[in-house]
Amino acid sequence: MRIWEFRPSAGSEREFERAYGPAGVWATLFRKHAGYLGTDLLRNVSTPGQYLTIDRFTSAEAFQTFKLRYADEYDRLDRECEALTAHERAIGDFTVIA
């Protein structure tokens, strides 16, 4: 799974939530790849304006394959959504410990 931290641009919180949530444009793009398992959007209750996304794929390799196959669409969507975020940071790729 890939985890990102975001701070939406002032006044764009609802639009950000729609775009980055489990039914948003990012999840719609990810669904094109068979290795995609789902997205969670979390809002920090004690730090206003802080969000995390958790995008789950079957493996880190599945995500890399997705990125290669859909690079143009990914880059286009990233540019389109850029105005929605004041800050974004890739926290990293994680795996669940069984």
Image (cartoon, rainbow, N blue to C red):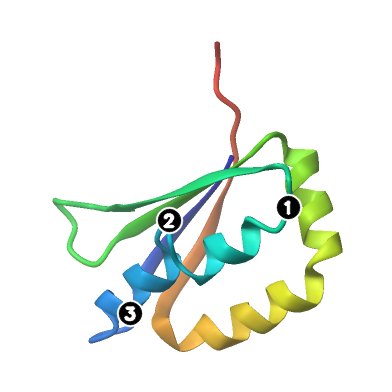
Which label is found at residue 33? 1
**Earlier sequence position, callout 3 versus callout 2:** 3
Find disc 2 in the rendering and name its residue. 22
| Res 92 label | none
Vertical side of 89 occupied by 96: above or below: above
**Can you identify the residue that label 3 sits on?**
15
CA gap, disc 1 and disc 3: 24 Å
From the image, state whether disc 3 or disc 2 is nearer to you.
2
Image point (79%, 78%), residue name: 72
Amino acid at the residue labelled 3: Glu
> In the image, 12: left or right of 97?
left
Out of 54 and 5, give the one closest to the viewer.
54
Name the amino acid, label 1.
His
Are the residues flagged by discs 2 and 1 in contact, CB closer than 8 Å? Answer: no
The location of residue 23, given as percent across then percent down, is 43, 61
Q: Residue at x 17, y 63 (%)?
A: 48
Q: Given the current orientation, which residue lies at the most extreme top position?
A: 98
Quadrant of the frame with the C terminus = top right
Residue 52 % position (x, y):
39, 53
The residue type indicated by label 2 comes to Pro
91 and 73: which is toward the camera: 73
Instruction: Give coordinates of residue 8: x percent, y percent.
Output: 34, 75
The residues bearing labels 3 and 2 have C-alpha atoms spaced at a distance of: 13 Å
